[in-house]
Image: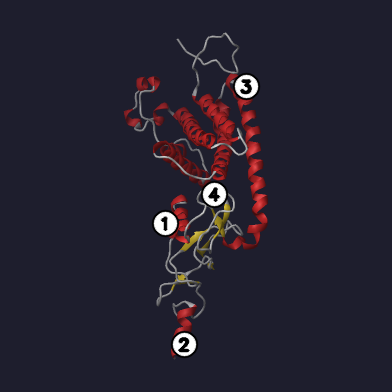
Amino acid sequence: MEIRPRNRREPLGSQPDVDFPPVQNGIDYLLSVTDHLTHGDPPEPRDLKYAILHLQAAVEVLLKARLQREHWSQVFKNPGAATRARFESGDFESCTTDAALDRLAGIAGVTIADKAVKTLGVLTKSRNALQHYGLSTSAPAVEARAAEVLTFLMEFFTTELQPDLSMDEDKLLQRDMAVIRARLGTITSYLKQRHNEIRAELTPVADSVVECPVCAQFAVQVGFPDPQCSFCHMGWVHSYGLLFDYLRAFDRPGLLTGGCPGCGHEEMLRQTRVAAAPASPRTLCFSCATSLGPQTATCTNCAALYEPGEDDLGMCPRCLAQRFEKL
């Protein structure tokens, strides 16, 4: 016998059942996420906790619902060992979110933007931290990340899942989607308000403003001993701390370079996006905000980075000037 919970769609007195097919289950998680994020102003820590947990659950369920339509064995951790009996009983270990994304791209031909993949990766880390040993982060950061993931999932549902729904299921879910869109609009309005509040502060220094590794907003001005995000108020004791979190959050350790020609600190990072020109990454020092163009060279004398010019003899301007002083 099926067991369904009594809910808003069924009259009191009806037989309670539990019946949440994959897509409906994922959308129900999204309802919970938006409910928690709009429950208070600002949301309580407990609301933020369950927003993270349920958002990750929604990601896993909806990604795997699309993967399941390609073939039910693809949701297994090891598809080669999949059996129909274990699938129908739910007695199996499913693949990770990363594996689901890889299989969607490689097997189902579903294109997911790199930015969305990175955002989902950060969400997974936050969920794992919260689930296993606790998480301490800022409320605005949670809301900003959640808004990005919600926006992605809304588009994913529309393009990858909705076309294959039955007419009855689509009609049922559209009511939930309308509620989610309205709540997402409230969250997005809050984010726009925060950006408007900090715009005057950050616009004049946009060449040295990078993405915050916590909330992913362009709101951290580098070049200070103890930088802080203007959007989510996350702070770092030293610029090294910011650089470390940035490298970890955006998976960019291979781009860390040598000493800075301005301050000498080894906090130069290639391919860094700044608010002034996100589409034109540059080499930027997180310690003093010295910025170099896309073409950089390493000084053969002091190993510092510099922008090469004609007849620079392989040395940075400082070392070149010292060389000529000795002549």
Residue depicted at 34% across the width and 32% down the height: 78
Q: Secondary structure at mark 4?
A: loop
Residue 56 left/right relative to 132: right
Identity of the amino acid at label 3?
A: Lys
In the image, 29 versus 35, the foreground residue is 35
Q: Is residue 294 above or below residue 313?
A: above
Going from the N terminus, do you reach mark 1 or mark 3 first?
3
Disc 2: which residue: 324
- The answer, for residue 312, to whether it is visible in the render is no
Identify the image quadrant of the N terminus. Answer: top left
**Callout count:** 4
The picture places residue 129, in percent across and down from the top left corner, at: 42, 41
Residue 308 left/right relative to 172: left
Disc 1: which residue: 253
Going from the N terminus, do you reach mark 1 or mark 2 first?
1
Going from the N terminus, do you reach mark 3 or mark 2 first?
3
Asked where in the image residue 252 lies, by quadrant, the reply is bottom left
The picture places residue 126, in percent across and down from the top left corner, at: 46, 41
The picture places residue 151, in percent across and down from the top left corner, at: 59, 38
Disc 3: which residue: 171
Q: What distance separates the C-alpha of mark 1 from that of mark 3? A: 47 Å
Identity of the amino acid at label 1?
A: Pro
The picture places residue 153, in percent across and down from the top left corner, at: 55, 36
Residue depicted at 35% across the width and 26% down the height: 92
Q: What distance separates the C-alpha of mark 3 from that of mark 2? A: 78 Å
Q: Secondary structure at mark 2?
A: helix
Q: Secondary structure at mark 3?
A: helix
| CB within 8 Å, label 1 to label 2 | no
Disc 4: which residue: 216
